[in-house]
Image (spheres, rainbow, N blue to C red):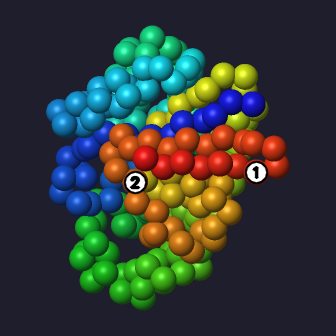
Amino acid sequence: MAPVYLTRHGLTEANLRRVRAGLTDIPLVAEGRAQAERLARRLRDSGIDHIWTSPLRRAVETAHVLSGFLDVPLTEEPGLIEIDVGPWEGLGEDDVAARFPAEYEIWRNRPTTLQLPGHESLEHVRARAVPVIDRLIRRATPSLCVTHLGVLRVILLHYLARPLDEYGAIHFGHCGLARIARTDDRYDVEIS
């Protein structure tokens, strides 16, 4: 078994505007590419031999920077795509709170109970993302996954054995790094 490294894509215009990008296919800004380059240098001695990435452009661009620097192949993995936020796509916090006050309150306090047509549930995200990580942990060599904040939160809560309702408690910057490894009968999770 080998560790799996996880990162969030680099910075985008939607991040700068503080709106939900969801499934919108947007590129990185220059700082996002620079973040990926800095992460690549940090990972140079990690032993990573393959990168799996969300198929959204911002993740793929990040993965290409990393792949080029580390000289390893990459594969698009649909299980790592961002949460479909449905009607909240393109909206900032204030807009969501104003247009969907009851749903926003639920999302902030008990996100697993949110039932909003078109908004993917956290349980669904866990059901598609965790099997990807489980599969990669069984590899003989380290892997890297490039994904999104929502998916990272769900994955990390799962392996930290914490409830999904703690979703908002996980903070993870652009091109931040997490490492999940299996030791004996438990998972070790490091976030840096």
> Is 189 placed left or right of 177 in the picture?
right
From the image, tell me which residue sits under label 1: 186
> Is 53 placed left or right of 173 in the picture?
right
**Residue at mark 2 to residue at mark 1: CA–CA distance:** 23 Å
From the image, tell me which residue sits under label 2: 172
Q: Position of residue 70 (x, y in %)?
A: 43, 16
- Quarter of the rendering containing residue 172: bottom left
Picture disc at residue 106: none
Q: Nearer the viewer, residue 94 or 109?
A: 109
Q: Position of residue 131 (x, y in %)?
A: 71, 44
Give me the residue at 17% from left, 33% from top.
30
- Give, as a three-letter code, the residue at label 1: Arg
Give me the residue at 36% from left, 81% from top.
100
Q: Nearer the viewer, residue 192 or 55?
A: 192
Q: Element at badge 1? A: strand
* In this rendering, the label closer to the viewer, 2 or 1: 1
Give me the residue at 52% from left, 15% from top.
73
Whether the residues at callouts 2 and 1 have beta carbons within 8 Å, the answer is no
> Is 139 placed left or right of 166 in the picture?
right
- Give, as a three-letter code, the residue at label 2: Phe
